[in-house]
Image (spheres, grey):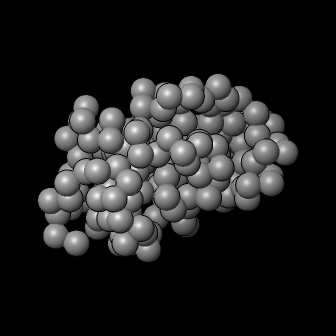
């Protein structure tokens, strides 16, 4: 991505990164490559020959389960204002991942929602979560109220950001 598409904004992260927080481990890894809207088709075309059969372009849940296997690369649109994890693109901050757990239908279908409270609490206990960044992105994804309620009521996390 850096070499072929240096001007595109993107994020790359793997589903198995959540195993640190989930009680039931994720057995089949997926790689999320989120690219700004204008570049999705170009990136898909550019890398589909090299990774034939392992790349899906904005799949719905049914397509993901029908055609997705281990280490499938899921190319999807990067939502504007998505938090960055530093200078490396191969790093999605937890603020983004937490919001995407609620906003991304495919991601929601891959992990058990019953473990969200414990997993998110573990994220907050182990790492510093910037709640301002989290709620800004949640607002962009129209999940601000849902996540606020979840953090406060279900996960028992003190919300310190102005919401």
Residue 31 in the image, given as x and y percentages of width and height = 58, 37
Would you identify the image quadrant in which residue 54 lies? top right
State the quadrant of the C terminus: bottom left
Q: Residue at x 75, y 48 (%)?
A: 64
Viewer-closest of 148 and 76: 148
- Image vertical order of residue 136 relative to residue 11, above or below: below
**Residue that protrudes farthest toward the right in the picture:** 66
Viewer-closest of 94 and 72: 94
Residue 56 in the image, given as x and y percentages of width and height = 72, 48
- Residue 82 seen by the camera: no
Q: Is residue 1 left or right of residue 154?
A: right
Q: Residue at x 26, y 41 (%)?
A: 124
Q: Is residue 162 left or right of residue 86?
A: left
Q: Is residue 8 left or right of residue 73?
A: left
How many numbered marks are there?
0
Would you identify the image quadrant in which residue 26 lies? top right
Residue 119 in the image, given as x and y percentages of width and height = 41, 38
Would you identify the image quadrant in which residue 87 lies? top left
Q: Residue at x 23, y 46 (%)?
A: 129
- Residue 91 seen by the camera: yes
Q: Residue at x 37, y 43 (%)?
A: 120
Residue 135 in the image, given as x and y percentages of width and height = 29, 64
Viewer-closest of 7 and 63: 63
């Amino acid at each position: 991505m850096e070499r072929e598409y240096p001007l595109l904004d993107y994020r790359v992260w793997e589903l198995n990164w959540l195993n640190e927080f989930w009680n039931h481990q994720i057995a089949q890894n997926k790689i999320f490559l989120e690219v700004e809207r204008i570049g999705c088709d170009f990136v898909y075309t550019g890398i589909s020959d090299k990774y034939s059969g392992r790349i899906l372009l904005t799949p719905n849940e049914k397509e993901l389960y029908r055609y997705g296997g281990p280490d499938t690369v899921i190319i999807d649109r990067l939502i504007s204002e998505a938090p960055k994890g530093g200078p490396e693109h191969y790093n999605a901050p937890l603020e983004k991942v937490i919001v995407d757990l609620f906003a991304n239908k495919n991601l929601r279908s891959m992990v058990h929602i019953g473990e969200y409270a414990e997993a998110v609490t573990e994220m907050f206990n182990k790492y510093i979560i910037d709640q301002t960044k989290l709620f800004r992105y949640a607002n962009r994804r129209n999940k601000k109220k849902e996540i606020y309620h979840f953090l406060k009521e279900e996960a028992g996390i003190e919300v310190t950001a102005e919401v």
